[in-house]
Image (cartoon, rainbow, N blue to C red):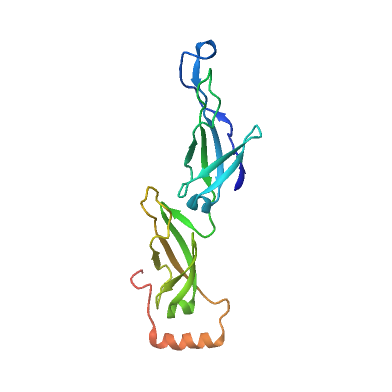
Amino acid sequence: RARGRAGPGAGGFGGFGGGGPGGAGGFRARGPDARYALEIDFLEAVKGATKRITLPDGGTLDVKIPEGVEDGQTIRLRGKGGEGYGGGPPGDAMVTLSVRPHPVFRREGADIHVTLPITLDEAVLGGKVAAPTIDGSVRVTVPECASGGRTLRLRGRGVARGQGKGRGDQFVTLRIVSPPEIDDDLKRFMKEWRETHAYDPRKGMT
């Protein structure tokens, strides 16, 4: 179980909620809401997690984060706010989430986007390569003669939509990475190949 600390504004309270006769002095009211900010990891947001935050008074509060939450979303914990007045019910705790960016994954709604580096020979010859997903590494097929910027779609590898609506997809955009060093054999081959297979990928741009 992860632990955290309530963020800026933690322990702030909202207004009274409802009222009526009864209790001390004939006044009974719902307790105020308490508002907290909580920062979570990208994968905690998409996969779900339980976080324990430390409150300003030293107490703790367990926050169950459902899978698929988004940055800025607020979770309501009923009855975890301030005490009621005159025997009234307690308020709620309102926890607003801040999701840290991930170095590999980028999210758009329920879809995940990844840029995948491939070698020059993988781009030309194709083959199966390892690609990261939020569930772990999978093997994807790079087609022969793949261009940089080409996008592959992995259906059902995205974020859960909730309410039984399935999951989004993952989109893998290929990025061709040249060798760190070019040897004489590769230079000679490319020069010979260019003489008989020249093509212009910028045709029509100028």
Q: Position of residue 56 (x, y in %)?
A: 64, 33
**Residue occupying the point 49% across, 60% down:** 135
Q: Position of residue 18 (x, y in %)?
A: 45, 21
Q: Nearer the viewer, residue 204 or 11?
A: 11
Horizontal arrangement in the rendering, residue 81 relative to residue 172 (left or right): right
72 w.r.t. 175: above or below: above
**Residue occupying the point 50% across, 14% down:** 27
Horizontal arrangement in the rendering, residue 202 relative to residue 56 (left or right): left
Q: Residue furthest top?
A: 25
**Residue occupying the point 59% across, 42% down:** 52
Q: Position of residue 150 (x, y in %)?
A: 40, 68
Q: Position of residue 130 (x, y in %)?
A: 49, 70
Q: Residue furthest right?
A: 58
Q: Nearer the viewer, residue 102 or 161?
A: 161
The image quarter containing residue 197 is bottom left
Tell me the quarter of the image containing the C terminus: bottom left
